[in-house]
């Protein structure tokens, strides 16, 4: 970007900020920084600036770079959900492109601030990620880089198996936890960065003592009492072999993944919301003479490119944009039946989309507002591979809507729970896949079981359904096996 355009960009960002507020948006204060393409690749690959190093991040970096070099993908911006928010612009983008990106960013930061699913995320994650990286670097120094990397391989293979609902807590509790971690307040005994791990160790000793008492009474308790979705938390608390530093590494991975969960829950809404407002902010800037006619035409081209529908996958920008647009239109112009039966009043479209932005996630958004008319207009359908060809298998609008919603259950990851942590009375770990029509990749599942064994230290088992049959995959430290179960 030319140096002569920097002052103009600063002014345009200010205008976009003012217009966003005129439209009723309430974004976090946003700090913009121009960075070269290599830094943008790094941020996109690591998902957070300053995050811990691992080869998977490097792999993602080179994939991003290759796609960009081949002209198959372009990163316009990256924005981080913090307060204040941080947004990174590409140096090589021109003035118009970065103005367009800034307008888009204000839609995101308004969404971060006001959507209920983001209310429990840490607003200091950049600082926390850097501290986490320092802790992992210290473990690499103490225990060897290769050992820590191999341990991270195992943890990252199951990082998505967390339970977000356990993470929800009030801001006061979260602040107290952060103060304890920083040492700004103390417990009744001396505080260290491992206090949470010592407490888990104490809980584990108490649990084992209670188990022993129950065994003596002839009533071995079920462990856990009910299935546990948060596999990482279960390993932190109950793995019989992990050292304190290893429990800490798992907790780092868990906390960072939980930070990204609201973004996964609202991808369609968040991108649709940002797209709605970048289009309106930029049009308003053009109407006020802040953009030239040529820039207005070029923006229309860029906007159309971002919202271009795909023939093989859902474009979240396009789908979210169209649904928000349809909600506003329908609530601005309710039918007579809607007015009489539902009490809708004309002209309530803006209020309605702000309400949806605040209260919904992608599942409720699509279930409630993806209408028959939109499914037909957007030409949505379900398809699958039969032999060597992809074929359309469903065009009924309700089944299409429900199929899209189902694909978002657990963010597309298999839903696996800890069913028994003392299987066969031998401290073996029994996991159960809650099968919802999508079979596991057997090669991936068997390799992942080996990683889980690395974290548990005893034989591990996974019950699932494959080709319509209940099977049990097992790994005992030396070999994988597969057993067909009775129905």
Image (cartoon, helix red, strand yellow):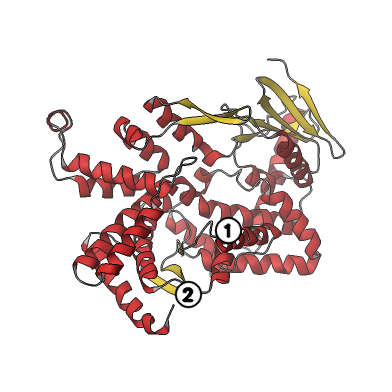
Q: Residues within 10 Å of mark 2 (few under 14, many from 20)?
A: some
Residue 329 lies in quadrant: top left
- Residue 182 percent across, percent down from the top left: 57, 69
Pick out the residue farthest to the top.
487
Pick out the residue farthest to the right.
478
Is residue 320 in view? yes
Which residue shows up at 59% across the image and 66% down it? Answer: 42
Residue on which disc 1 sits: 67
Which is nearer the N-term, disc 2 or disc 1? Answer: 1
SS of the residue under disc 2 = loop
Disc marking residue 91: 2
Quadrant where the image shows the N terminus: bottom left
Is 161 on the left or on the right of 483, as rendered? left
Is 259 on the left or on the right of 399, as rendered? right
Front residue of 126 and 56: 56
Front residue of 473 and 393: 393
Front residue of 447 and 422: 447
Which residue shows up at 48% across the image and 41% down it? Answer: 313
Is residue 183 in view? no
Which residue shows up at 30% across the image and 78% down it? Answer: 11
Q: Residues within 10 Å of mark 1 (few under 14, many from 20)?
A: few
SS of the residue under disc 1 = helix
- Residue 308 percent across, percent down from the top left: 40, 49
């Amino acid at each position: 970007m030319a140096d002569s355009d920097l002052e103009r960009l600063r002014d345009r960002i200010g205008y976009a900020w003012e217009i966003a507020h005129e439209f009723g948006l309430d974004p976090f204060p946003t700090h913009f920084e121009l960075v070269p393409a290599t830094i943008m690749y790094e941020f996109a690959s690591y998902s957070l600036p300053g995050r811990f190093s691992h080869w998977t991040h490097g792999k993602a970096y080179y994939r991003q770079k290759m796609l960009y070099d081949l002209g198959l993908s372009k990163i316009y911006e990256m924005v981080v959900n913090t307060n204040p928010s941080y947004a990174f612009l590409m140096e090589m983008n021109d003035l118009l492109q970065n103005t367009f990106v800034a307008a888009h960013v204000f839609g995101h930061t308004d969404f971060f601030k006001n959507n209920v699913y983001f209310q429990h995320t840490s607003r200091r994650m950049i600082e926390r990620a850097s501290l986490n990286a320092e802790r992992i670097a210290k473990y690499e120094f103490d225990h060897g880089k290769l050992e820590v990397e191999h341990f991270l391989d195992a943890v990252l293979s199951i990082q998505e198996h967390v339970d977000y609902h356990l993470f929800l807590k009030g801001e006061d509790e979260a602040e107290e936890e952060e103060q304890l971690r920083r040492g700004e307040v103390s417990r009744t005994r001396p505080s260290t960065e491992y206090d949470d791990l010592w407490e888990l160790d104490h809980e584990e000793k108490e649990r084992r003592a209670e188990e022993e008492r129950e065994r003596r009474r002839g009533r071995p308790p079920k462990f856990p009492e009910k299935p546990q979705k948060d596999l990482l938390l279960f390993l932190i608390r109950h793995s019989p072999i992990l050292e304190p530093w290893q429990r800490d590494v798992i907790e780092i991975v868990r906390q960072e993944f939980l930070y990204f969960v609201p973004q996964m829950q609202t991808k369609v809404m968040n991108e649709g919301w940002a797209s709605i407002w970048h289009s309106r902010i930029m049009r308003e800037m053009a109407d006020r003479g802040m953009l030239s006619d040529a820039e207005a035409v070029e923006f229309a081209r860029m906007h159309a490119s971002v919202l271009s529908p795909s023939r093989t996958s859902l474009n979240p920008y396009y789908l979210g944009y169209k649904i928000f647009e349809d909600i506003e239109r329908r609530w601005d112009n309710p039918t007579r039946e809607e007015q009489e039966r539902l009490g809708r009043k004309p002209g309530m479209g803006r209020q309605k989309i702000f309400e949806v932005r605040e209260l919904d996630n992608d599942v409720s958004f699509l279930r409630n507002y993806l209408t028959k008319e939109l499914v037909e207009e957007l030409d949505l359908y379900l398809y699958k591979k039969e032999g060597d060809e992809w074929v359309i298998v469903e065009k009924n609008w309700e089944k299409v809507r429900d199929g899209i919603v189902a694909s978002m259950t657990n963010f597309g990851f298999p839903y696996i729970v800890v069913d028994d942590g003392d299987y066969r009375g031998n401290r073996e770990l029994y996991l159960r896949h809650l099968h919802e029509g999508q079979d596991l990749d057997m090669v991936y599942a068997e390799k992942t079981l080996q990683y889980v064994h690395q974290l548990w230290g005893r034989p591990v088992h996974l019950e699932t359904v494959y080709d319509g049959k209940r099977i049990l995959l097992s790994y005992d430290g030396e070999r994988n096996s597969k057993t067909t179960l009775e129905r």
